[in-house]
Each structure stands twice: as C-alpha cells, then as structure tokens.
Amino acid sequence: MFSHFMIGANDIEASRKFYDAVLSTIGVGTGRLDDKGRCFYLNPMIPLIIAQPLDGQPASGANGGTIGFSAKTPAAVDAWHAAGVSHGGTSCEDPPGWRSGNGGRTYYAAYLRDPADNKLCAVHHPG
C-alpha cells in the first residue's frame, strides 16, 4: 500500500543525528544524503525520507499524525526513546510502558517528537 514516508525538517543535519540515533536502536542503518540534501533511511520494506519542505515554508509536525516504528522487545523501545531524548527529541504522551489497545491487546510503546515536532512512536507487540 505505501511506497515511502517523507517527514519535513528545518535542519536536516539535526534531524539526521536524531534519526540515526533512534533508528539504530531498532536495527535501521544510518541515513544517506542525496544530491538534493534529502536524507534516506532504506530498509527492506518502506523507506523513510527526511527533507526540507518543497514549498520553502517551515516544516511542522502533523496535528494528529504519528509515524510508528516496530521494535522487537520492550528494551528496544526504551533504547529508542532514550536515544531520541538525548539527540534533540522530546518525550510526549505517557512514559514508555505497557498499554492496552483495541480488543484488549497489550503492547509496549513510547512516543517522541523529533526536532521538527513530528510525532513518532516505537512499539513492541508481543507474540
């Protein structure tokens, strides 16, 4: 269904440092800049692209939007969150921990805002 995700950033280098740190905790390699200054995180599924908005206006977080990343363990979620906070991100929502979802399913999650205020989540679904 999806081909890629693109997130706006005002400072590509600050965002690259942030995403290199948080994505490394869940097994994603470092970002690579292209000749237009966009930063690509490639993986077997769907690439994540960090770029300045094409319209020249400042990047801003999507109100109501969240990009979720899969983590293999609760410890990986905690590491993701800690890396984000120590690399320019801001913790949001409740602290990292277990939550209940639709149909009584439980999952372990943490939420951050990146340097451009995009809302992110790392989540571990057991079993």
Image: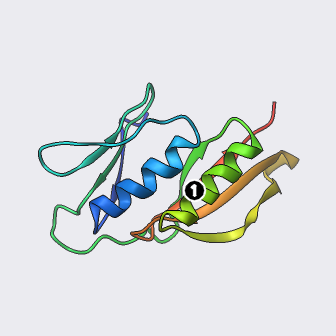
Q: Quadrant of residue 73?
A: top right
Q: Residue placed at 45% from the left, 65% from the top?
A: 118
Where, quadrant-wise, is the N terminus in this rendering?
Answer: top left
**Image coords of residue 39 (percent x, y):** 28, 47
Q: Nearer the viewer, residue 100 or 71?
A: 71
Q: Among all residues in the image, which is located at the extreme left?
A: 35
Position of residue 72 measured from the top left corner of the image (x, y, whole percent): 69, 35
Q: Nearer the viewer, residue 80 or 44?
A: 80
Please determine whether, in this image, residue 95 is positioned above or below residue 110. below
**Quadrant into which the C terminus falls:** top right
Nearest the eye: 124 or 12: 12
Query: In the rendered view, does 123 fall on the left or right side of 31?
Result: right
Left or right relative to 87: residue 5 = left
Image coordinates for residue 37, horizontal then vertical, percent: 18, 52
Classify mark 1: residues with Cα within 10 Å, few (<14), some (14-19) or many (20+). many
Is 80 on the left-hand or right-hand side of 13? right
Q: How many numbered marks are there?
A: 1
Residue farthest to the front, as pictured: 86
x then y, percent, for residue 42: 37, 33
Kind of residue indicated by mark 1? Ala
Quarter of the rendering containing residue 74? top right
The relative height of residue 59 versus residue 67 in the rendered view (above or below) is below
- Residue displayed at 78% across by 47% down: 107
Applied colour scheme = rainbow
Q: 126 or 27, which lies in front?
A: 27
> Seen from this angle, which residue lies furthest right?
104
Helix or strand or loop: what does disc 1 sit on?
helix
The residue that mark 1 highlights is: 83
Residue at x-position 22% and y-position 63%: 53
Q: Residue at x 48, y 72 (%)?
A: 63
